Amino acid sequence: MTGGDPVSWFLIEPGWKVDDAQGEEVGSVDEVVGDSSNDIFNGLSISTSLLGRPRYVPSEQVGQITEGRVQLKLAKAQVEHLGEFEEPPTSAAISPEAAGAFRRAEASVEAPIHSHGERSNFVTRVVHALRRTFGR
């Protein structure tokens, strides 16, 4: 990974380059998942290929973050075996069996802080691939 001062996960943007532990580029950031109001970073959704589904990288596997680039603690082979990213719901309602019809409990569920509706469509992947190939 080339130099640069480390930055907070709050600054990560879709399209940033993602490197493996050895500094080889393996994809780009698709989405950041966390709770920005409580400073809880859960992980990243990354695109590793033009036609492939986004992969989920848990925060524990994210190494140094510098402007425009995220380095993972994983080797390239490990990145290829990451699970598919599934977008979390923005909220969930939980209805306990003992609760009446008018009672319900709502639970807060963490949502992506950088959400964009076209996240997994083909055009977005093409744009990210072009940025990786030709720079910003």
Image: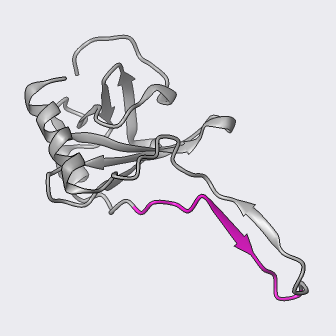
Q: Main secondary structure of the magenta part?
A: loop
Q: Quadrant of residue 34?
A: top right
Q: Quadrant of residue 31?
A: top left
Q: Among all residues in the image, which is located at the extreme left?
A: 133
Q: Is residue 25 magenta?
A: no
**Position of residue 100 measured from the top left corner of the image (x, y, whole percent):** 91, 86
In this view, 7 is above or below 27: above
Q: Which quadrant of the rendered structure holds the N terminus? A: top left
In this view, 10 is above or below 49: above
**Position of residue 29 measured from the top left corner of the image (x, y, whole percent):** 32, 40
The image shows a total of numbered marks equal to: 0
Q: Which residues are magenta?
A: 86-98
**Position of residue 49 measured from the top left corner of the image (x, y, whole percent):** 15, 51
| Residue at image location 33% in from the left, 62% down from the top | 83
Horizontal side of residue 95 vs 7, given as left or right: right
Between 60 and 119, the residue placed more toward the observer is 119
Between 11 and 22, the residue placed more toward the observer is 11
Horizontal side of residue 60 vs 89, given as left or right: left
Q: Is residue 96 magenta?
A: yes
Horizontal side of residue 84 vs 91, given as left or right: left
Q: Which quadrant of the rendered structure holds the C terminus? A: top left
| Residue at image location 67% in from the left, 67% down from the top | 92
| Residue at image location 41% in from the left, 17% down from the top | 6
**Position of residue 8 measured from the top left corner of the image (x, y, whole percent):** 49, 23
